[in-house]
Amino acid sequence: MRRLFWLGLGVAAGVAVSRKIAGFAHRATPAGVAENLADAVREMAGALGTFGADVRAGMAEREEELASEVERKTGYSYSRRRGYAAAPSDAARARGADGR
């Protein structure tokens, strides 16, 4: 019984080691290196896309802050969709008449 146990353990260890060596040998071939490089480039592209989305979201948020500040100080409302400054709103005209 002991011999059978050790035989099974030896076979399992041999299979595990041979699979590790085969995997390492594949990664060392040009095809394996190309796969690793492709995975790295794909991961970097995803990270850059996420970074770009974060930057655009921050820009939009800051643009809204600046637009609301301009509207508060001058009364002109900037519409990003139209791409030009709109005429002062009625509330802004009223503030201008009051001098506030």
Image: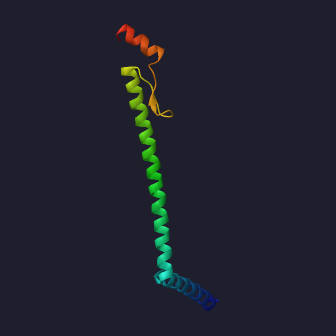
Left or right placement of residue 11 versus residue 86 in this view: right
The residue positioned farthest toward the top in the image shown = 98
Where 95 falls versus 45 (above or below)?
A: above
Foreground residue among 82 and 52: 82
Foreground residue among 2 and 12: 12
Q: What percent of the width, then of the height, locates residue 80?
A: 47, 34
Task: Say which quadrant the N terminus sits in.
Answer: bottom right
Q: What percent of the width, then of the height, locates residue 30?
A: 47, 82
Which colour scheme appears in the figure?
rainbow
Q: What percent of the width, then of the height, locates residue 82?
A: 50, 32
Where 26 falls versus 37 (above or below)?
A: below
Picture residue at 47% right of the left edge, 18% below the top: 89
Left or right placement of residue 74 versus residue 17 in this view: left
- Count of numbered marks: 0
Where 82 falls versus 53 (above or below)?
A: above
Q: In which image quadrant can residue 74 be found?
A: top left
Task: Say which quadrant the C terminus sits in.
Answer: top left
Where 86 falls versus 49 (above or below)?
A: above
Picture residue at 43% right of the left edge, 32% below the top: 64
Q: In which image quadrant can residue 97 be found?
A: top left
Picture residue at 55% right of the left edge, 88% below the top: 14
Picture residue at 51% right of the left edge, 81% below the top: 31
